[in-house]
Amino acid sequence: MSFYNNLLNNKPKLLSKIENMTIKKYTIHPSSFVSEKASIGENTQIWHFSHIREGAKIGKNVNIGQNVYIDKDVVIGDNCKIQNNVSVYKGVTIKNNVFVGPSVVFTNDIYPVSGEWSDSKIVETFIGEEVSIGANSTIVAGITIGDMTLVGAGSVVTKNLPNNCIAYGNPAKVKSEDYRKE
Ligand SMILES: CC(C)(COP(=O)(O)OP(=O)(O)OC[C@H]1O[C@@H](n2cnc3c(N)ncnc32)[C@H](O)[C@@H]1OP(=O)(O)O)[C@@H](O)C(=O)NCCC(=O)NCCS
């Protein structure tokens, strides 16, 4: 059996870690790499081939799909669902109950140049409570998306979005307001 088949056929591991004198239990598939210096909340599940970097803080009951990259110091709240192939770079904060659709990319550098990197280039992004981000969307660095907003599939979000609206397109525009009851 190949190396990858071997990994895929392994059962996810239920792990316990003592953090601040409490024992946390979460599930990590053996094919994923989670830094010892990341904090993972109780009942969180991390599926195949994902990488969680040092300093990342992931809340309780979070479901992280396959091939997800969570960069250093990223903050993800409780009860979030991060679908397959999502990349979340340093400087991004995601609050509670957020849905991030498959292949969504967050960015942190407005003028990227290969070989030129320092944390001072990072432009922060904030994703509000109960936001949903449609498949294959790109969130340009420096954006705030308001609580309960829905971003349509394939959008490129280049400007802040208010609470409780539906926005989509490239660039994403608000198409309807009062999407959900507050
Ligand atoms: C944004 C969204 C919620 C809009 O749904 P809706 O309000 O029912 O809108 P409609 O389907 O009636 O579409 C209205 C118009 O917007 C267009 N449109 C809809 N979604 C769009 C999108 N994501 N990007 C660009 N245009 C879009 C439609 O083509 C239609 O155009 P028309 O008026 O010229 O015919 C939905 O299309 C969407 O993208 N949902 C996210 C799906 C997703 O990624 N799920 C992830 C889990 S798999």
Image (cartoon, helix red, strand yellow):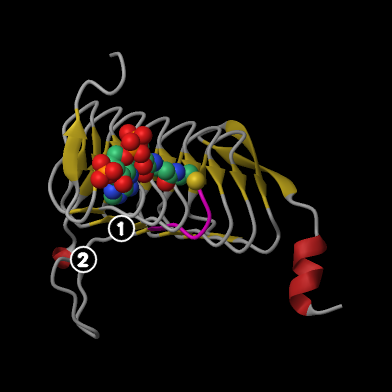
Counting from the top left corner in percent of width and height, residue 2 is at: 81, 79
Q: Residues within 10 Å of mark 2 (few under 14, many from 20)?
A: few
Say whether residue 83 is magenta.
Answer: yes
Tell me whether the residue at label 2 lies in contact with that at label 1, contact meaning CB atoms closer than 8 angstroms.
yes
Mark 2 = which residue? 119
Residue at screen point 33% across, 55% down? 154
SS label for mark 1:
loop
Q: Is residue 47 above or below residue 3?
A: above
Rendered view: 18 above or below 169: above
Q: Quick one: quadrant of the N terminus?
A: bottom right
| Front position among marks 2 and 1 | 1
Q: Which residues are magenta?
A: 82-87
Examine the structure image and report whether residue 22 is included in the region drawn in magenta: no
Q: Is residue 100 visible?
A: no
Q: Amino acid at mark 2?
A: Asp
On the question of residue 41 being in view, the answer is yes
Quarter of the view holding residue 93: top left
- The label shown at residue 60 is none
The residue at which mark 1 appears reads as: 90
Image location of residue 153, percent across then percent down: 36, 49
Q: Which residue occupies the foreground of this view, 3 or 151?
A: 151
- Say which amino acid is labelled 1: Lys
Q: Residue at x 20, y 56 (%)?
A: 170
Residue 48 percent coordinates (x, y):
64, 59
